[in-house]
Image (tube, coloured by chain):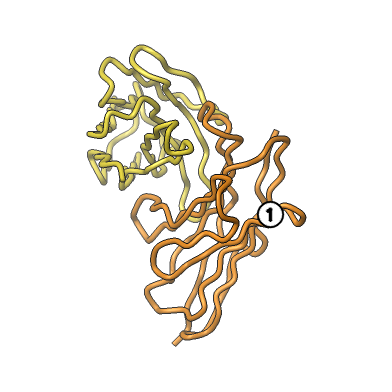
Chain colours: A orange, B yellow
Amino acid sequence: AQSVTQLGSHVSVSEGALVLLRCNYSSSVPPYLFWYVQYPNQGLQLLLKYTSAATLVKGINGFEAEFKKSETSFHLTKPSAHMSDAAEYFCAVSAGSGSARQLTFGSGTQLTVLP
Amino acid sequence: EADIYQTPRYLVIGTGKKITLECSQTMGHDKMYWYQQDPGMELHLIHYSYGVNSTEKGDLSSESTVSRIRTEHFPLTLESARPSHTSQYLCASSLPSSGNTIYFGEGSWLTVV
């Protein structure tokens, strides 16, 4: 079984400030981890993914995430928030390339960027 | 990146009507999925398919049905829509070679009145 916990359903930051969105996972096997972003009235767009290569993963739009096995975490960061970053962010864990039932999404974190 | 197309994007229908949400992908992905998402809420897997003639129910029970007659096409049907079916429906597909990375369509917003 696997699960994902996103700490904080709403996060607000000022424009130019550090963005930190937290994600912790549990998995009985080495996981693949993903961050998706969803803008209003749109589908989910892949930001970045970890698939057992480098633990620090760089994604689109200046985001990156670090896989920390000891902490079972995969937090998403961006050094300087932009107004266009305001969206819903979902962390997801997959136990590998198996069935769709093995991909589990977190409940999402709504990021607000204040001017 | 996968190209996944969903139609309609927005639909308002009356109770009792039959509707089909279309989903097509052009990348030859074997696996396809339907997720349901209420506004501001998490995603729930309602259907998935490993390939042609393969369909499975997901974690969330749904009154909808799906079919997979062609690799690129994975439509979702509601035989008799009810207000409780009002939601966003997201279609997605993946390839095992990409670490099972799932790529999503733009979504179909369904409102049943």
Q: Residue drawn at (57%, 39%), measured in percent from left and top? A: A94
Tell me if residue B2 comes above or below residue B17 in the rendering.
below
Q: Residues within 10 Å of mark 1 (few under 14, many from 20)?
A: many
Q: Read off the chain for label 1.
A: A
Tell me if residue B32 comes above or below residue A5 in the rendering.
above
Question: Is A98 on the left or on the right of A59, as rendered?
Answer: right
Image coordinates for residue B62, horizontal then vertical, percent = 49, 27
Residue found farthest to the right: A70
B17 and A9: which one is in front?
Answer: A9
The residue labelled by disc 1 is A24
Q: Residue drawn at (75%, 57%), measured in percent from left and top? A: A71
Question: Is B103 on the left or on the right of B19, as rendered?
Answer: right
The three-letter amino acid code for the residue at tag 1 is Asn
Image coordinates for residue B61, horizontal then vertical, percent = 54, 27
Residue found farthest to the top: B53
Element at label 1 = strand
Which quarter of the image is occupied by the C terminus of chain B?
top left
Question: Is B82 on the left or on the right of A6, as rendered?
Answer: left
